[in-house]
Amino acid sequence: DICSTPRLFSNNPQDVQVKQGILGDCWFLCACVALQKSKYLLNKVIPPGQPNWTDESYQGCFTCRVWQFGHWVEVTIDDRLPCLGGKLCFSQCQTEDLFWLPLLEKAYAKVHGSYEQLWAGQVADALVDLTGGIAERWTLKGPGRNVEKEKTAMVLEKAVFRRLTNLKEQCVISCSVLNSRQGNRCLVEHCYGTLLGKELNVNFCLTCSGQGWSQLDPVVASELLSHIQEGEFWVDEEEFFREFDEITVSFPVNEDGQLQSLYTEKVLYHSQNLFGSWVRGQSAGGCRNNSSFPTNPKFWLRVCEKSEVCIALLQKHRKYSADWAGRIKNLTHLAEENLSLTEGIQGKNYQAVGLHVWKVEKKRFNLPKTLSAPPVVGTVCHSYDREVHVCCDLSPGFYLVVPSTFLKDAVGNFLLRVFSTGRISLSELKPPPADAALCEELPAGEWETVQLHGCWKNGQSAGGSRNFPSFHINPCFPLSIPAGPGTSSVKVTLRQHCQDSKCRPIGFHIFQVPNSSWKPHTSSFLHLEPLVSCVPHCYSQEVSQLCRLPAGSYVIVPSTYLPNTEGNFTVVVATKIDR
């Protein structure tokens, strides 16, 4: 045993200092500070109520959660920690009887395959893994700037930094030194957490030896020193911009688990996620320099009201894949068989990716003409980052979102995420299937797909089938078919989230309703007959129905056969686009 009275957390909320061990994972430790700024995140990553060392039911293990490629993955680890000479050799808390940090570090290492895999990384990636949100990164200095440009850029960057310090209590601000410079041996290649900022009317500088304090009023110096704990130091603004290369900031997450904008502090209430992939010869069109760019995956983004919108493109690590439990496993043997996993710039595990958005007046548009026009927003360049994103204000309407790799035929999987202050919908523009097997799922043509998530809750939204008077409390999803020539082809799929052995009997009905504002109540369905029914209810992971619907307003009502049967589900609506 390395401690006789171990604790998971401290009763003192100020006791948040972390210490790095011999493992080069300062990037991960900086991100861990985010958990101390949000009770919601702390409970999300380290679920409360777990038995610990003082409980009789304690079995020597803890469960943590890590966000991986769109999902929170549970990771269980034992409490045996690597030591040298009876001391922890990797991370530890400043208060040595606290163990939440080394246990979380062990869980994160397990997700990545080993402690060794945590050697060197990006603070932004760790912040996303521990918050499920977005992280912004700024370069404080760039190569090849002339003096005049540098002066202009520095003013802008300092203005941004001063605004960000207002968010210091809500999110993590991390700064990094990427290249050690002569004359300042204490700042080596490393990541630092920025704890707080303070405005002073005097200039001061703190070096490793502390000689710079001589320029500071003794009263002010005493006040600043009273806030300093081991591992902390003060620098003035000029020195900060001179010595540090990069700053990384996480988007704040409120206590309801919703992101807030870094730019306006508005809550991004609405979010949508869709998975996609670049497939060689089909949808890996490369950047806009290539004539094949239009073959890249395309997504519809409908903005219902003027909104601040953040669109993020997250690519999956090409060196690893996840097993059934969500743990990442090394695929070296598979990479040897499939060279596309290891193609690209040597030493890089990610493709260079970019993201561009065009506004279109209507869904039926000229694709080549649209893509030849300047986008309304896009990444400055393709970047070898795990995630890239754009943030902007968008007016109501339809937008075409195109994620791409820089190189043509570069393969990979990705997750497209959209966060917005206003109502949005995100759907994929499906190309005609090239595989005969896929043709059985969706007939040939271009299809727009929308994913809707819901749940049946006992006493609230688990009404059972139409045989029961509680049917009306089931979740209802509006479906609007726009006016057009003839009827529209629609395929609805209901997929329940459970293991095969625990499937419940599920089905759904589609009702035509007077208008989109129609609300279900006890007598709503008494005089309504469904236009489409996917019954009898089946003990299956998913059920689906292909139909043709005239223009109008509809509701899709998914249900279990018996009332008060709980479960989570996804409704996928695919509508054919006739050109």
Image (cartoon, grey):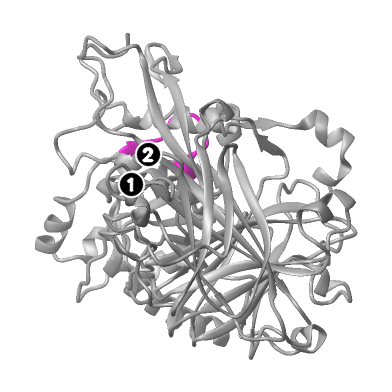
Q: Answer yes or no: is residue 441 visible.
A: yes
Please report the residue visible at 51 percent of the width from the left and 81 percent of the height from the top: 153
Please report the residue visible at 57 percent of the width from the left and 43 percent of the height from the top: 536
Q: Answer yes or no: is residue 245 visible.
A: no
Q: Is 504 above or below relative to 37?
A: above
Q: Residue 267 versus residue 288: which sits nearer the camera?
A: 267
Q: In the image, residue 530 lies at what x, y percent?
A: 52, 62
Q: In the image, residue 186 lies at what x, y percent?
A: 43, 47
Residue that carries the numbered disc 1 in the rendered image: 41
Q: Residue 185 versus residue 277: which sits nearer the camera?
A: 277
Q: Is 217 above or below relative to 374?
A: above
Q: Residue 557 versus residue 242: which sits nearer the camera?
A: 557
Q: Secondary structure at mark 2?
A: helix
Q: In the image, residue 513 lies at what x, y percent?
A: 46, 74
Q: Is residue 69 left or right of residue 338?
A: left
The dot on residue 45 is: 2
The amino acid sitting under disc 2 is Val
Q: Is 9 above or below relative to 192?
A: above
| Magenta extent | 18-28
Please report the residue visible at 25 percent of the width from the left and 59 percent of the height from the top: 169
Q: Residues within 10 Å of mark 1 (few under 14, many from 20)?
A: many
Tell me where residue 332 sits by quadrant: top right
The dot on residue 199 is: none
Magenta stretch: includes residue 231: no
Q: Quadrant of the N terminus?
A: top left
The amino acid sitting under disc 1 is Leu
Q: Secondary structure at mark 1?
A: helix
Q: Are marks 2 and 1 in contact (CB under 8 Å)?
A: yes
Q: In the image, residue 532 lies at what x, y percent?
A: 59, 61
Q: Quadrant of the C terminus?
A: bottom right
Tell me where residue 115 sits by quadrant: top right
